[in-house]
Image (cartoon, helix red, strand yellow):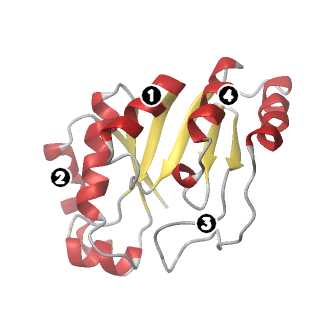
């Protein structure tokens, strides 16, 4: 089993998921405060780091943080809602910085259900674009899904749709 450490690079998000376990706060690491965290994982022999939040892509130094962790020999992963990875240049920047795996959160392929769960309109097309951009840039892609009463009846539909339309998705993580 891989030994992975988590770094919450920000505590805020651009979505309003009602089940989120990371409440928004104004606290945010800067690059200098993250370096010792990365160095500690390396010193303790960790395999990798998972960059998380809130929404980690909202951190202005995320590519720099990613590159530092990768340069220290860590396998770099990120849990994201995909909003910024929908921008192809940002996906390219993250790939060039050394991001190796993106866990993109998608809770339902039904737009009305996804919108209700995210508390934000029109998130599904951006999440799909994030999957495709990450895959095109060589970043492995997993789907992160929180099972709840709004999506439990159609999880199989989600899997079929995602595998059919985004064949580079490697794995599904169910919470």
Residue tagged by mark 4? 69
Q: Position of residue 168 (x, y in %)?
A: 26, 34
Q: CA distance from mark 1 to mark 3?
A: 23 Å
Any part of residue 154 in sight: yes
Residue 172 shows which numbered tag?
none
The mark nearer the N terminus, 3 or 2, is 3
Residue tagged by mark 3? 12
Nearer the observer: mark 1 or 2; the answer is: 1
| Total numbered circles | 4
Q: Residues within 10 Å of mark 4 (few under 14, many from 20)?
A: many
Dot 1: element: helix
Q: Quadrant of residue 11?
A: bottom right
Q: Residue at x 75, y 51 (%)?
A: 29
Dot 3: element: loop
Q: CA distance from mark 2 to mark 4?
A: 34 Å
Residue tagged by mark 1? 95
Q: Residue at x 53, y 26 (%)?
A: 97
Q: Residue at x 30, y 44 (%)?
A: 131
Q: Is residue 69 left or right of residue 157?
A: right
The mark nearer the N terminus, 1 or 3, is 3
Dot 4: element: helix
Dot 2: element: helix
The mark nearer the N terminus, 2 or 4, is 4
């Amino acid at each position: 089993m891989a030994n992975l450490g988590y770094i919450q690079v920000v505590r805020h998000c651009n979505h309003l998921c009602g089940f989120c376990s990371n409440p928004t706060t104004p606290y945010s690491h800067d690059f200098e405060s993250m370096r010792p965290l990365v160095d500690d994982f390396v010193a303790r022999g960790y395999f990798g780091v998972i960059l998380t939040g809130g929404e980690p892509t909202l951190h202005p130094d995320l590519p720099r943080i990613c590159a530092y962790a990768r340069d220290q020999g860590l396998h770099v992963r990120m849990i994201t809602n995909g909003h910024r990875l929908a921008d192809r240049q940002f996906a390219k920047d993250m790939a060039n910085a050394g991001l190796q795996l993106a866990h993109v959160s998608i809770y339902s392929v039904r737009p009305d259900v996804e919108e209700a769960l995210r508390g934000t309109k029109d998130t599904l097309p951006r999440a799909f674009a994030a999957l495709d951009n990450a895959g095109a840039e060589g970043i492995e892609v997993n789907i992160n899904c929180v099972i709840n009463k709004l999506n439990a009846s159609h999880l199989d539909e989600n899997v079929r749709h995602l595998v059919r339309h985004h064949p580079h998705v490697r794995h599904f993580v169910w919470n």
